Each structure stands twice: as C-alpha cells, then as structure tokens.
Amino acid sequence: MVHALKQAPAKADFTYFQFPAWVEVYRQKNSVEIPTDLEADYFSALSELPSLVAASAKRKWDSNFLCCALSAIAAAKGFGSVAEAVQEINPEVAEEFMEWFFNR
C-alpha cells in the first residue's frame, strides 16, 4: 500500500493513509509481532508515511483526508492510541471534545 502511495501521494485517496495507520493501530493494540523477515520492510514503509503526508499537502483536503493523514503520522511515530482517536474525530467531534476538555 505504501509503495503504491509513493507513486502519486498528491493524488491518493484518503484510504491510502487510513489503511496502513489502522494496520499499525491494530498491531500495537494487540501486541502483534511482525515476522522477522518482514520487520525491516514493514517499519521502513511505516516511516515513510509522514513524508508522504507532506507530499500531499498541496492538494485540497476534506475532513476525512485530514483525519487519515494525521492518523498515519501518529501511527508512523508509534502513537497507536492517538492514531486511532484521530481517525474518529471530525470537526463536530473536535468541537465537542474541546468543550468537554475545557469544562472538565
């Protein structure tokens, strides 16, 4: 998926960022180990996500793309719980969260 994304990150659909982020979220939540023979390639691909998000920055983003791009960065940097949460946030949820956060 990341290899395909590298071909044209500015034209990629949000799912090209969402899928690898979800894989890493699931892997972290369930303590799934990467097979030794795939480990280097897996983590290398994951580490490319932030620069691919940056390469897509010139295109127009909707809220789905924003959430998936942010999630991909968080997952690539090892923050699985943040990656999962970001995929669930849309502008309305963000407003509700901020209200809850400041009034708690």
Image (cartoon, grey):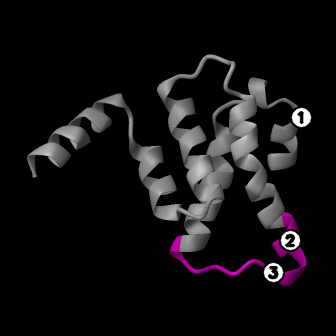
In this rendering, the answer to whether 71 lies above or below 80 is: above
Q: Which amino acid does label 3 sit on?
A: Pro
In which quadrant of the rendered view does residue 47 lie? bottom right
Task: Decide: few, some or many residues near mark 1? Use Cα within 10 Å; few <14, some 14-19, many ≥20.
Answer: few
How many discs appear? 3
Task: Decide: few, some or many residues near mark 2? Use Cα within 10 Å; few <14, some 14-19, many ≥20.
Answer: few
Q: Mark 3 points at which residue?
A: 35
Q: Name the residue under label 2.
A: 40
Question: Residue 100: image x %, image y %?
Answer: 16, 45
User: Is residue 91 found inside the magenta-colored segment of the image?
Assistant: no
Task: Decide: few, some or many residues near mark 3? Use Cα within 10 Å; few <14, some 14-19, many ≥20.
Answer: few
Question: Residue 82: image x %, image y %?
Answer: 46, 56
3D distance between C-alphas at marks 3 and 1: 26 Å
* Foreground residue among 20 and 97: 97
Label located before the other in sequence (1 or 2): 1
Q: Mark 1 points at which residue?
A: 7
Q: What is the magenta range?
A: 29-41
Secondary element under disc 3, as helix, strand or loop, is loop
Question: Residue 46: image x %, image y %?
Answer: 74, 57
Q: What residue type is labelled 1?
A: Gln
Residue at image coords 75%, 41%? 51
Residue at image coords 29%, 30%? 92
Q: Which amino acid does label 2 sit on?
A: Ala
User: Is residue 36 found inside the magenta-colored segment of the image?
Assistant: yes
Is 5 positioned to the left or the right of 91 in the image?
Answer: right
